[in-house]
Amino acid sequence: MKKSKKNKNLWLKEAEIEIGDLYFTTAQQYRAVLAINGDFLIYAPSSEGMDSLPPDSPMPFANSPAKKCQIATFAQKEYQAFDWHGTLAGKHKLTSSQIDEAIGQCNAKAQIAGLMAE
C-alpha cells in the first residue's frame, strides 16, 4: 500500500493558531481551539467525514473528548478552506457562546484548567 504524501502547503502556521478558531481538515474533521498555554493547546475534534455545517447547527463536538497536543503537532495536519455563515476561509472565529458550547460538548473544563495551571 502506497503512503500518501502530506501537502505542507495545507498546514497551518503555528503563530496564526488562536483560541476560538474553528478549522476543517482535509479528512472532513472540524477542530476548535479551546485553550492555549505555551507550546500546548486543547482542542475539540469532531468525527471525520463530516458534511458542511449549516449556519444554525450546533457545534459538532458532542460526546467527543477534548484533546491536548503541541501546537506544532496540531498545525501539521492538512486543513482546507470551508464555508461558515457565508464566508469561505481557512479558519473562522467562534463566538463566546459557541466556544462555551464546544467546551461543554467535549467535557473540556477540567482539561483546560489543568493546562492553564501548568
Image (cartoon, rainbow, N blue to C red):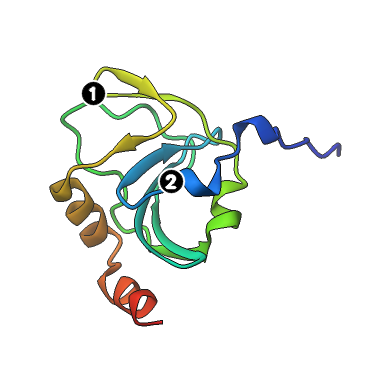
- Above or below residue 19? Residue 35 is below
User: Which three-letter amino acid code belongs to the residue tagged 2?
Assistant: Ser
User: Which three-letter amino acid code belongs to the residue tagged 1?
Assistant: His
Q: Position of residue 118 (x, y in %)?
A: 41, 82
Cα–Cα gap, marks 1 and 2: 20 Å
What residue is shown at x 62% (from left), y 47% (from top)?
A: 76
Q: Quadrant of residue 93?
A: top left
Q: Secondary structure at mark 1?
A: loop
Question: Relative to residue 51, is residue 86 drawn left or right?
Answer: left
Q: Position of residue 41 (x, y in %)?
A: 44, 62
Mark 1 or 2: the one toward you: 1
Determine which of the numbered discs, if any, sits on residue 27 in the image: none
Q: Quadrant of residue 9?
A: top right
Mark 1 vs 2: CB contact within 8 A = no
Front residue of 9/66: it is 9
What residue is shown at x 16% (from left), y 49% (from top)?
A: 96
For the N terminus, which image quadrant? top right
What residue is shown at x 15% (from left), y 30% (from top)?
A: 56
Residue tagged 2: 47
Question: Relative to residue 107, is residue 51 drawn left or right?
Answer: right
Residue tagged 1: 85
- Above or below residue 20? Residue 10 is above
